[in-house]
Image (spheres, grey):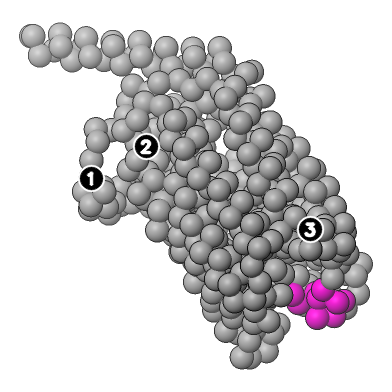
Amino acid sequence: MSGTLLRGTEEAEQQQAEQHFRDHVARHLSRNAKAFLLHGMLGMTGFRLVTAPTFVPAYLYLLSGSKLTVGLVLAAQYAGMAASSIWGATLIEHRQRVMPLIYLVGWLVRGQILGLALSALLLSGRGALAAAAAFLLLFGLLNGVQSVSFNYLTSKIIPLARRGRLTALRNFFGGLTAAAVAWLGGRYLVGNDVFGNGYAATFLAAFVLTSLGISALAGMREPALHDVRMPAGFRRRVRELPALLAADRDFVRFFIARALVAFGMMAMPFYAIYAGRLLGLDGTILGYLSLAYLLAQTGSNLVWGHIADRCGYRLVFLASIAIWIAATAWLLSCATLPGFLLAFCGLGTGFGGFFVSADNLVMEFGARKDRPMLLAVSDTATYSMMAIGPVIGGLLAQSLYFPLVFVAAIAVKSAAFVLALRIADPRLRRRLEARDIP
């Protein structure tokens, strides 16, 4: 009898704590949404300047003259993200609040962008290349932790029913700013060799914008969670992963499909280099290609967000992969600037939809207390493939037929699309379970 009363008391306390959590989310939703949007408009702009397939690959190619070196350096960045994602999950899954860790790691990430800018400004030749590789590796290591932490924070403060629209608006405003800064960076900073090194000036601009972005997070009000895990060591959590994955086959299909698409990103560092072989790779061309890529990524986000809220992220995931495949195939047939601009629009649209859907679809699987580890597992698989892909792409581009890189990317993404068709929509599945439909 006493055991039953105790369980009843515990359940009542859990329900009360959950209601307090939901009340906090609803009460601060407007404030948190504004900070979420402002962070995206400023912080994401700076990160997109670093991660877009234009400035960093072109800078590395300028220093090395080797496509393989470009692939190896970018592989080191993604290897760092893969290595730190699960560790990042173990740092946050027992915390009732994760904002303090996000601030700490966020500023360390931005320090690597500043280091990249200063090394480009002060060093040259092999010294600049070695420094760029080191800063991009550290950027990846820290960003793996930041990515898991921030996506988990998003799942806490933005309800699922509003997440698609707000994420789309965040990406839209951030993308508009990024597109403008990218065009200005290519046209005026790189084109006019500002500070004696236009790439250094562009990376400095990225540092300033990302710093303003993380400062905007001060306006957020994070709720404390009651259903968190007890602290556990890294090795123990790794040993528990097989059981976590075995519990949901659809999640396994999803993270394998996501990893395959990431492997297909072997072609990304070479989009601009391939266009440059036919058009000439100067600051103006970089600016136009970056503008097309980022504007398409930005504008499509509003459509992707609307589709996600109405039909779920699974449909966005599938559609974005299909568009990405078509745009890569179109790239191979291009010979003029208008053709390449159209191809980069398609690449930006596919990339934008893929990352909006991939980051949000993973948060629809599993219980809330399992999400940090599910995010980390998915990120680890994705970033591991993003690390391997550029190396293989660099080998293909350097030693064999350059367009073979894009053919391989199309084949891998097509396999991912076929596997993704077998994923049952977790949103629909949860609705059926809530109605007790067998």
Q: Label 1 amino acid? A: Gly
Question: In the drawing, does residue 344 fall left or right of residue 321?
Answer: right
Asked whether disc 3 touches disc 1, contact meaning CB atoms under 8 Å apart, the reply is no
Q: Which stretch did the figure color magenta?
A: 273-281
Q: Which residue is most to the bottom?
A: 400
Q: Report the residue marked by disc 1.
A: 233
Residue 218 image point, x, y percent: 57, 25
Lower sequence index among marks 1 and 2 = 2
Residue 438 image point, x, y percent: 38, 36
Q: Answer above or below: position of 118 versus 428.
A: below
Residue 195 badge: 3
Question: In the drawing, does residue 339 fall left or right of residue 331?
Answer: right
Residue 92 badge: 2
Camera-side residue of 416 and 156: 156
Asked whether disc 1 touches disc 2, contact meaning CB atoms under 8 Å apart, the reply is no
SS for tag 2?
A: helix
